[in-house]
Amino acid sequence: MSFHELEGLVRELGEAPYRARQLFTCIYAQREQDVSKFSTLSKDFRSALVSKGLSVGMPTIARRFISSDGTVRYLIALEDGQTVETVWMPDGDNGEAGDGSQAGDEEEAGTASKSYRRATICVSSQVGCAVNCGFCLTALLGLQRNLTAGEIVGQVVVVLNDHSVAVDRERINLVFMGQGEPLLNYDNFIKAVQLLHEGVGIPQSRMTVSTSGIVPKIHDLGREETRPKLAISLNAPDDEIREGIMPLNRKWNIAAILEAARAFPLRAREKLTFEYVLLKDINDQAEHAEKVAALVGSLRCKINLIAWNPGPEVPYEMPSTESVAAFQAVLIRRGVPAFIRRPRGRDIYAACGQLKRSIA
């Protein structure tokens, strides 16, 4: 429930208006899960909430998978028995030198209470995905359903609680880059962003949403008062290649995406991010990099280069380290900031494009 919805609940129960702020703080900032322990509320009000059948619904952790590099992949169980995946990447960066929007390293199991200076949580927005990118394991699941705003926020709260994180003292980044296309679940995604910002206390500047290129919703996002930074999955230098690996390109091609990117209202010191998954002999050659630089060179942007992370039933190969470095060198020479994303959690299917609700 949003703050305004809680205001309506407080009026309905005949309580003073200030109780809405107390409720909002208990649920989101303090992350208290038991209504009977909302100590700032009167006993009568707590009893009224319980009598009305209200509780703090929370997803549960079904499984934890800990990578050799320390990344943790959570299999999160929802109330209807569906599951999604959420990834915790603590204390460090994700290979993007000088860029604090990504993640870090983790400790062994049993040290979740340790405080971290910086961490990133990768959040899912749907159960499965309908976009069907050819290089992504999540596409194999198809779309089961959208997540509610509460389920999106719940993923973050569960992980924060599991690591005893105090968001007012530690730098927590959120990336909406897990299962699903966030902009195809737009209303719930935006409501979750507002709750995470206004309630849980995550600054807008530390949130990033990745989209495959849902052009009308990119325009809508630009009009939001509270919004994350924008990352667009480009992944190809031209429409022919992009359509082959991202069927969505038939609906919104590269020209449409770039038009939306140029119109997107950037805040001070903000840059657009273009994500680019490199597939061996498909889109990873120097001539491809030259074309990409020509496409985005006039934009205030950076490019994150992601060497494809392998998975079963996906017919691509990883690019060589040399071709990734050469691709980056071309972009930098052409004046486009380019960063190579270091893969995290590849051995536990937690890396980019590997989330498929696996249980091993």
Image: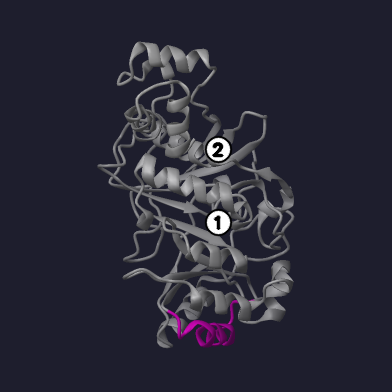
For the residue pair 347 and 251, the one nearer the viewer reads as 251
Q: Can you say which quadrant of the picture contains the C terminus? A: top right
Left or right of 87 on screen, residue 214: right
Residue 354 shows in the view? yes
Left or right of 240 on screen, residue 108: left
Q: Is 348 placed above or below 47 here? A: below
Q: Is 154 placed above or below 332 here? A: above
For the residue pair 213 and 52, the one nearer the viewer reads as 52
Q: CA distance from mark 2 to mark 1?
A: 21 Å
Query: Residue 155's spot in the image, x, y percent?
Result: 50, 38
Instruction: Considering the whole magenta stretch, tell me its main secondary structure.
Output: helix
**Quarter of the rendering containing residue 127:** top right
Name the residue tied to disc 2: 151
Amino acid type of disc 1?
Answer: Cys
For the residue pair 68 and 147, the one nearer the viewer reads as 147
Residue at the image point whose x is 36% and y is 58% from the top: 205
For the residue pair 296 and 308, the one nearer the viewer reads as 296
What range of the chain is rendered magenta?
A: 283-299
Query: Residue 271's spot in the image, x, y percent?
Result: 40, 71
Determine the secondary structure under disc 1: loop
Query: Residue 185's spot in the image, x, y percent?
Result: 62, 51
Residue at the image point whose x is 32% and y is 70% from the top: 268
Amino acid type of disc 2?
Answer: Glu
Q: Is residue 320 magenta?
A: no
Name the residue tied to disc 1: 352
Of circles 2 and 1, the one toward us is 2
Q: Is residue 287 magenta?
A: yes
Residue at the image point whose x is 43% and y is 12% from the top: 47
Determine the secondary structure under disc 2: helix
